[in-house]
Amino acid sequence: MSGAKNILVACASSGAGRSTALALARRGHTVYAALPMLDGPYTAAASVLQQATQAEPLALHPLVMDVTCTASVQAAVAVILDAVGAIDVVIHFADSALIGITETVTVEQAQELFNADLFGALRVNQAVLPHMRRQGSGLLVYLSCTAGSLVYPFMGIYNAAKAALESMAQTLHYELYSLGIDTAVIQACAFASNVEARIHVAHAPAQAEAYGPVGAVAERFVRRFPVGILPAEVDIFHDVAELVAELMETPLGQRPFKAAIGPYTDPLQFVHQAVAAVQSQVLPSIGFGDLGERQIPKRTVA
């Protein structure tokens, strides 16, 4: 994609979402940085974005959009279309984590995570895709993490949400690619959003004790998360923002469907290549051979 684009970043309240919104605006794009609200608990986040627009000549617009509310999403998309007439790129971010022994996770906690991570992305896609189909172009970018392909203990529902998000993204790729709408999934190391601010813990000491040594491991993991699994020197927020910009600038047909970035992610390129090879064999056998053919090139990651 060349030239300045109209971009919706959902959500840009913190972490890589905010970094990406700022980085793309500084590259000359028009960016709508969505937050669930511009006041209350998000006052500070909105202020950072507003101060950037005052200090620099940026086309950066903080926008109220709660991805857990269909009406809010539809209203936000309408505001963008009324203002600039087009949405070229949508970048999906989520900034929550749910950790602990899976048995102790409540159904309500699981529903809340899926409502934001999976159904939130679905709501946004359903609002923007009619427009993208009419214009015959678009790019959907999803920030996932290694949990989309790998399985971590004590993160069962989080793993499931990321795997579901990536499955939906790949299905949409098959359905949309021939219409000129591309898809890219970024699998970042844990974690490229400000999850330490929104960690939900399934905590039940009695049940953890019943798990014996496994419960003790779970308790240590919860206490150290996420600092204990992410090297302090890694600036993953900046790296993700740069990768998003790189993916946007890559021409249709050359853009990888999945790109892994950050510590511990090098081996994922082999997982991506192996799955792509299997998909390329299975889909033609059931009549889907012409949908979304794509090569996943080897990528050197940091």
Image (cartoon, rainbow, N blue to C red):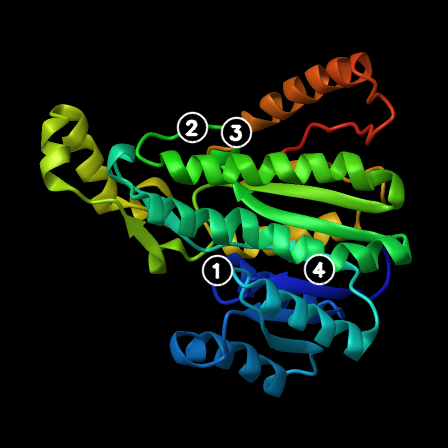
Q: CA distance from mark 3 to mark 1?
A: 22 Å
Task: Please tell me which of labels 4 and 2 falls first in the chain.
Answer: 4
Closest to the observer: 144 or 86? 86
In the picture, measured across the screen, residue 58 lies left or right of residue 201, that is right
- Furthest-bottom residue in view? 54
The crowd level at tag 3 (other Cα within 10 Å; few <14, some 14-19, many 20+) is some
Q: What's under tag 3, amino acid-wise? A: Ser
In the picture, measured across the screen, residue 168 lies left or right of residue 85, that is left
The residue that mark 2 highlights is: 151
Q: CA distance from mark 3 to mark 2?
A: 7 Å
The crowd level at tag 2 (other Cα within 10 Å; few <14, some 14-19, many 20+) is some
Q: Quadrant of the C terminus?
A: top right
Find residue 127 and name its label: 4
Closer to us: mark 4 or mark 2? 4
Q: Residue at position x 60%, y 52% from top?
A: 121
Label 1: state its secondary structure.
helix
The residue that mark 3 highlights is: 149
Closest to the observer: 7 or 136? 136
Residue 118 lies, with reference to residue 54, above or below; the image says above
Closer to us: mark 4 or mark 3? 4
Closer to us: mark 3 or mark 1? 3
Q: Residue at position x 55%, y 65% from top?
A: 12
Q: Residue at position x 50%, y 70% from top?
A: 36
Q: What's under tag 2, amino acid-wise? A: Val
The residue that mark 1 highlights is: 15
